[in-house]
Amino acid sequence: MSPRIIAVVNQKGGVGKSTVTMGMAAVCAETSRTLVVDIDPQGSVTFWSDQAGDNLPFDTTSDLDPKNLARLRELPYDVVFVDTPGSLENEHILNPVLDEADFLILPTEPAPLAVPPLLNTVRRLIEPRGVDYRVLINKFDPRTPSDAEEAAELIDSAGLKRFQTPIRQYKIHSRAPIDGLVVTQYRSSRSDLKAAEDFRRVAMEMMSYWANASTNKGGR
Ligand SMILES: Nc1ncnc2c1ncn2[C@@H]1O[C@H](COP(=O)(O)OP(=O)(O)OP(=O)(O)O)[C@@H](O)[C@H]1O
Ligand SMILES: [Mg+2]
């Protein structure tokens, strides 16, 4: 069976694309053969996996060749996550991935100014391809829930689709690349478990969208 291809996209830099890619891959790797492909010339995932050595619960690779990226579906995995750059400059690398993708995750910070780049990404790259996506609110600070509520309202009123579950802000997310660990490998405090729980919830939500999409197709 060919893998499900999920690209993590947002033209805005620093919103958590690499963090979300690695967190989602970590929870998916608990049940599925999982690969992360780094198509960001900045190489954050590659740095992260070099720090980890043989310690990651999934495989990673870096590939900037559009010809290879057009053949992701041939790889022997159940799930392939693609971490993309924080700009739309290298569209010849991004395009084959978006053409192949089954689902897109668009991480965003919970801030009003985050909405215009999201809208641009969706209108320009996603809607013309008709691929399903959800915006994912990241770096949610539970001490100021109104920020996330406001952001959610703005995202909804812009007509964008969004995950109901946000990813909370935790120190381990910023430490993980240098520690060479992924979120499921931290287990020493309650907040470590909560951080992993966020990603498990998002993964469940994502699977429920896939289940509904295939039910709808079946009913046609
Ligand atoms: N939920 C979170 N909690 C705490 N820190 C976070 C969280 N998500 C991301 N960060 C931190 O925010 C910074 C940006 O995250 P990340 O590198 O994943 O973003 P990006 O979208 O991949 O950036 P770029 O566009 O440069 O590739 C990093 O320092 C990361 O550790
Ligand atoms: Mg990145």
Image: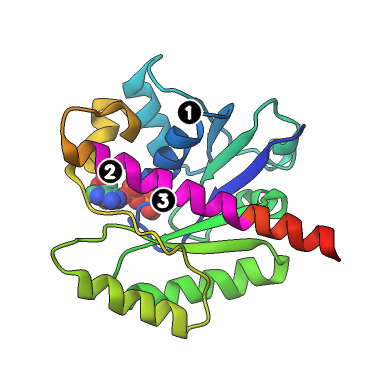
Query: The N terminus is located in which quarter?
Result: top right
- Measured in 3D between alpha carbons, the distance from the residue under mark 3 to the one under mark 1, in whole angstroms, is 20 Å
Q: Secondary structure at mark 1?
A: loop
Q: Kindly identify the amino acid type of the residue bearing the numbered disc 1.
A: Glu
| Magenta highlight: main SS | helix
Q: Which mark is residue 148?
A: none
Residue that carries the numbered disc 1 in the rendered image: 30
In this rendering, would 110 be left or right of 119?
left
Marking on residue 17: 3
- Dot 2 amino acid type: Ala
Q: Nearer the viewer, mark 2 or mark 3?
A: 2
In the depicted structure, whether residue 131 falls above or below residue 29? below
Q: Alpha-carbon neighbours of circle 3 within 10 Å: few (<14), some, or many (≥20)? A: many
Residue at x 71%, y 67% (from the top left corner): 130
State the mark number for residue 195: 2
Marks 2 and 1, how far apart in space? Answer: 16 Å
Type of amino acid at the residue the image marks with label 3: Lys
Q: Residue at x 65, y 53 (%)?
A: 210
Tell me where residue 138 sits by quadrant.
bottom left
Q: Is residue 102 magenta?
A: no
Q: Position of residue 99 (x, y in %)?
A: 71, 54
Q: Which residues are magenta?
A: 193-209
